[in-house]
Image (tube, rainbow, N blue to C red):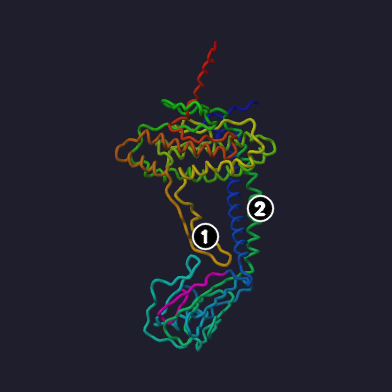
């Protein structure tokens, strides 16, 4: 029995494709969970390794000065009775606090149940100290009070305490319950000024890190093969040709010295009847695509790694994986064209990897042979000049070091230091959108330039994703379609001598 070929735009609706979609989805989910567990395990291991020779992960020292009677940890809710605390059957963590006066006063430091500490400091002016962003910081508002406290060492509420001149240190195991730390002058006088260093250690951190790493690897061992099998199955079902690229009114020939088009073709036809306001909500309308693309990009990374080894040893990019990865880039481009990389059409993108009659399209010529050696260097070393250009065109003015930008030192951590900016592409698209809003027109010249930036980006992506060996040209081919190949002029006959 012969199997019918899938129709363009309907690759995932053919017989048997549903099973590969299920495998792909399961593989992506397992891979995402595995990657998260693995990264968490590695991060936990790094934290465990950063514990100093005494076994503590240290923050500080930091100097804190207050005109009140005491420095305390923030007020919180929870158990307030001393009898509610219980010692856990195993050592979750041990905390250490080292305090030294910056003047001549003796210092007291203690840990006690929050309820009894609150009663001791009731109507006593004190300052709450919080640990924020990895450093000590004084709360902006002092807690007011009129009463003078008694000497803290005379109280019997402390589970751990130390008092005297010079550095004072307390160490206590983490317990259930609600606890407060108090730092005061030993004579209970005003104007507390100290240098604080805090540390914490846990014997469970290393086993937890190892468990997370093993669990993550186990999930990846399951997820990666399922992702690859699903991608290969869908890739084999993608039609070879499908719809032709969207028709455009004209193309721009390139100079003779650059007459050869790059084998990755990105096209887009500007919609003449764009809505003035729809671009304001396209971020919401495109959410289903963003969710799917997040998973597809995870699969793209996995299949590209598999392709790397296939090219290294065989010189060939597996055709099914090639079709799948091109389909991911095509899907991404259609959504980008609809949303905030172009805003050039109001037609909702189709949910398919295949070519369709959508006004935006992307395709890559399949290479029959690829270099064994170039695969080792082209995606990182040779592509660096293009990465710099793409960073200038599409990247921001700075790089985000993560949502919170944690920068870990050997014995301390620093707070968030995010740095970011708006890309040139974003600025141009925003300008086009504002013009559209007020004039009901999308400037063609601006659209052509935006297309050129996107075309450069996708060419570099094609090269870095190992799909072609041809080095991307350093040119901004503007306009809705790829430059038209022009024939080289016939060479002039040599002059006749004699």
Mark 1: few/some/many CA within 10 Å (<14, 14-19, 20+)? some
Distance from Cα at disc 2 to Cα at disc 1? 28 Å
Residue at far right of view: 313
Magenta stretch: helix, strand or loop mostly: strand
Left or right relative to 430: residue 290: right
Does the image show residue 303? no
Where residue 20 sits: x, y (%)?
Answer: 60, 39
Name the quadrant of the N terminus: top right
Where residue 58 sits: x, y (%)?
Answer: 56, 70
Asked whether 322 falls inside the magenta stretch, the response is no
**Helix, strand or loop status at disc 2:** helix
Identity of the residue drawn at 37% across and 81% down? 145
The image quarter in which residue 280 lies: top left
From the viewer's side, name the closer residue of 206 and 415.
415
Mark 2: few/some/many CA within 10 Å (<14, 14-19, 20+)? some
Name the quadrant of the C terminus: top right
Left or right relative to 77: residue 174: right
Q: What residue would you read off at disc 1?
A: 406
The image quarter in which residue 54 lies: bottom right
Which label sits in the foreground, 2 or 1?
1
Question: Badges 2 and 1: C-beta atoms under 8 Å apart?
Answer: no
**Helix, strand or loop status at disc 1:** loop
Where residue 89 sits: x, y (%)?
Answer: 63, 73
Where residue 127 sits: x, y (%)?
Answer: 42, 77
From the viewer's side, name the closer residue of 328 and 248.
248
Asked whether 75 falls inside the magenta stretch, the response is yes
Q: What residue would you read off at disc 2?
A: 218
What range of the chain is rendered magenta?
A: 58-76
């Amino acid at each position: 029995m012969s199997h019918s070929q899938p129709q363009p735009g309907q690759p995932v609706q053919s017989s048997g494709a549903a099973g590969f979609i299920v495998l792909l989805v399961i593989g992506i989910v397992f891979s995402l969970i595995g990657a998260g567990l693995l990264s968490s395990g590695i991060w936990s291991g790094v934290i465990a390794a950063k514990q100093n020779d005494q076994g503590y992960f240290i923050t500080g020292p930091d100097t804190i000065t207050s005109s009140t009677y005491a420095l305390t940890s923030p007020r919180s809710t929870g158990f307030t009775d001393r009898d509610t605390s219980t010692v856990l059957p195993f050592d979750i963590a041990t905390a250490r606090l080292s305090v030294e006066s910056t003047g001549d006063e003796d210092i007291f430091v203690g840990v006690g149940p929050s309820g009894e500490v609150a009663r001791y400091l009731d109507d006593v002016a004190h300052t709450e100290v919080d640990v924020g962003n990895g450093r000590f910081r004084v709360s902006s508002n002092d807690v007011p009070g009129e009463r003078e406290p008694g000497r803290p060492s005379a109280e019997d509420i402390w589970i751990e305490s130390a008092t005297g001149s010079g550095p004072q240190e307390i160490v206590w195991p983490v317990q259930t319950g609600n606890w407060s730390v108090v730092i005061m002058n030993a004579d209970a006088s005003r104007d507390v000024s100290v240098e604080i260093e805090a540390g914490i250690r846990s014997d469970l951190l290393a086993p937890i890190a190892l468990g997370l790493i093993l669990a993550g690897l186990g999930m990846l061992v399951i997820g990666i093969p399922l992702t690859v099998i699903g991608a290969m199955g869908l890739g084999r079902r993608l039609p070879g040709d499908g719809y032709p690229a969207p028709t455009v009114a004209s193309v721009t020939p390139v100079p003779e010295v650059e007459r050869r088009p790059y084998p990755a073709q990105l096209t887009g036809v500007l919609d003449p009847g764009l809505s003035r306001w729809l671009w304001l909500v396209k971020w919401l309308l495109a959410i289903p695509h963003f969710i799917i693309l997040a998973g597809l990009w995870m699969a793209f990374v996995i299949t590209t790694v598999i392709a790397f080894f296939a090219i290294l040893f065989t010189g060939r990019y597996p055709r099914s994986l090639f079709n799948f990865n091109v389909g991911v880039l095509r899907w991404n481009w259609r959504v980008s064209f609809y949303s905030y990389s172009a805003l050039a059409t109001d037609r909702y993108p189709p949910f398919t990897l295949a070519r369709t009659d959508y006004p935006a399209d992307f395709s890559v010529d399949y290479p029959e042979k690829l270099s064994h050696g170039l695969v080792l260097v082209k995606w990182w070393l040779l592509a660096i000049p293009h990465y710099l250009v793409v960073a200038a065109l599409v990247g921001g003015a700075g790089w985000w070091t993560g949502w919170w930008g944690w920068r870990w030192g050997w014995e301390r951590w620093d707070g968030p230091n995010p740095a970011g900016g708006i890309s040139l592409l974003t600025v141009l698209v925003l300008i086009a959108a504002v013009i559209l809003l007020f004039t009901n027109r999308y400037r063609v010249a601006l659209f052509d330039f935006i297309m050129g930036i996107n075309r450069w980006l996708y060419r570099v992506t094609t090269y870095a994703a190992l799909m072609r060996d041809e080095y991307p040209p350093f040119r901004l081919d503007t306009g809705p379609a790829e430059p038209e190949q022009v024939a080289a002029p016939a060479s002039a006959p040599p002059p006749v001598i004699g």
